Amino acid sequence: MICFVALFVFVVLAIFSAKYRPLAKEAFDCVFKRLTLRPCESGLDERIKATLVSSVFSKSPKAAAALNKHFELFSWVLTLLMIVSLAYSTVGVYNWWAYGNCNGPDQTGFCVFNALTGEHTQYSDCGANATVHPLTPPTSLRGEASGPESAKVVLIEFGCFECKYTKQAEPTVKQVLQDYSGRIRFIFKPFPLPTHNNSRVAEQAALCAAKQGKFWEYKDALFANQDALNTGERTVLMEAAAQAGVNESALAACLDSNETASEVEAFYQEGAASGLYGTPTFFINNRSLVGPKPFESFKTIIDEELAK
């Protein structure tokens, strides 16, 4: 059975070096014959056995004798471990493709595929100074909402207007809302990250715009002017108001009176209670996604929830 392991190893090595290709071909021939209940005539399995036993003998003659005696059992154990490892890797790749995390839906733990693609660094400047951990769905449906209240699926987003990854997720969110129009309810909850000094006032301004029925227009305008938000200049908020058709005088009065400050703080506390560690964070019913994810990640979960 050692030829099964050898085939996998030599095929991988052959990708990087031509000198392993004859061995990969020999291992394939050996595996094919074993699968058809014929002996491996090339002697590859015996050569591998001799090499391994010889290497172990130099360290421990007793261990080498045991390995030589039970080599077939040793080969079966290695083969089974390889099969299990490949199966878990396959499941991890599918989960990463479907849910954006190799650990599966509703998981937020470390994923090696995210690390390899650099995705694990995406939240370094949009984090809430917390470690990665499981999230708790919010307990309320408060927030700026669109879509039918009776929808079977509720998509909640905690977002920060100064976070570039919240902005990066916007096209995907819009695609989701377009493709599932009339079937889901979308709720946006402003979440001012402590790492972004001007995010709280931007969130307050957005809720002031909401009082004029212009939240969504103002939200788009803020993201369009995101690069200027870090200056902390109120003129940026006013320029966004002009672009969104928001009454600037009313917006200024609302900001001066801190009329929406308590609302923003309430959203922040709600996000903190849910365990948010970065933005954007999404909850699809009770299932979470963190960070900008491809449309397919949303689609998979939404379709599953709609099918329930």
Image (cartoon, rainbow, N blue to C red):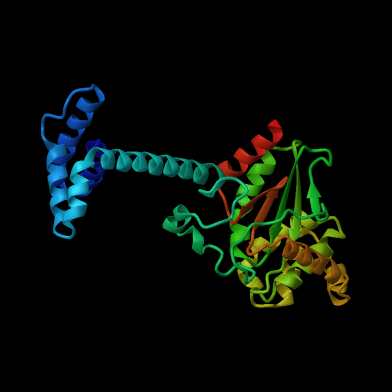
Tell which of 99 and 157 is nearer to you.
99
Compared to residue 243, the image places residue 249 above or below, namely: below
| Picture coordinates of residue 222, whole percent (x, y) | 69, 63
| Residue drawn at (44%, 43%) of the image | 88
> Seen in the image, is 250 located left or right of residue 299?
right
Is residue 22 at least partly visible in the picture? no
Image quadrant where one finds the C terminus: top right
Residue located at (76% from left, 70% from top): 238
What residue lies at 61% left-to-right and 61% top-to-bottom? 133
Q: Nearer the viewer, residue 221 or 6?
A: 6
Q: Position of residue 160 (x, y in %)?
A: 68, 64
Q: At which x and y percent is residue 174?
A: 66, 47
Residue 231 to residue 225: above or below: below
Q: Is residue 263 left or right of residue 198?
A: right
Dividing the picture into quadrants, the one containing residue 33 is top left
Q: How many marks?
A: 0
Q: Quadrant of residue 12?
A: top left
Q: Quadrant of residue 135?
A: bottom right
Q: Nearer the viewer, residue 48 or 211?
A: 48
Q: Quadrant of the N terminus?
A: top left
Q: Kindly identify the residue that appears in the image at 13 percent across and 48 percent down.
A: 51
Q: Is residue 79 visible?
A: yes
Residue 83 lies, in percent from the top left, at 37, 39
Residue found farthest to the front:
62
In the displayed structure, 32 sits above or below 52; it is above
